[in-house]
Image (tube, grey):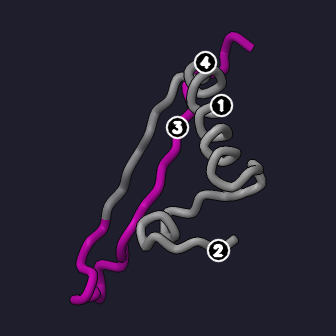
Amino acid sequence: MDDLSEFIVYADESGDHHLGKIDAQYPIFCLALCIINKKNYINHITPTIQQLKFDFWGHDNIILHERDIRKQELDL
């Protein structure tokens, strides 16, 4: 197990990656990375997100979608 990383890496993209035909309405491309220490993820991030879900919805069987958050839409 010593050869495994102590970090988790999340990568996500947003926008139009097609450079051959750029969308004039949304001419943006963004690549974002988040590098998290596994101990912080286990001990702090996961419990905090679960608590938020229980506080807001009363359960943790909900998936937080970026589009819903950005557009402030709820699909319960």
- Give the amino acid type for the residue marked by disc 4 in the picture: Lys
The residue at the point 48 percent across, 49 percent down is: 11
The residue at the point 36 percent across, 72 percent down is: 15
- Give the amino acid type for the residue marked by disc 3 in the picture: Val
Q: Mark 3 or mark 4: which comes first in sequence?
A: 3
Q: Mark 1 or mark 2: which comes first in sequence?
A: 1
By secondary structure, the bulk of the magenta-drawn segment is best described as loop
The answer for how far apart the CA atoms under marks 3 and 4 are is 13 Å
Is residue 63 shown left or right of residue 22?
Answer: right
Mark in the foreground, 2 or 3:
2
What kind of element bears circle 2? loop
Q: Mark 4 or mark 2: which comes first in sequence?
A: 4
Q: Is 24 above or below relative to 59?
A: below
Say which of 70 and 13 sits in front.
Answer: 70
Q: Which residue is mark 4?
A: 39
Mark in the foreground, 3 or 4:
4
What kind of element bears circle 3? strand
Mark in the foreground, 3 or 1:
1
- Give the amino acid type for the residue marked by disc 1 in the picture: Pro
Please report the bounds of the magenta region as a residue range. Answer: 1-29
Q: Which x, y percent locates residue 10?
A: 52, 44
Count neighbours of disc 4 (C-alpha within 10 A) and say few if under 14, some if 14 to 19, many if 20 or more: few
Q: Which residue is mark 3?
A: 9
Q: Which residue is mark 1?
A: 47
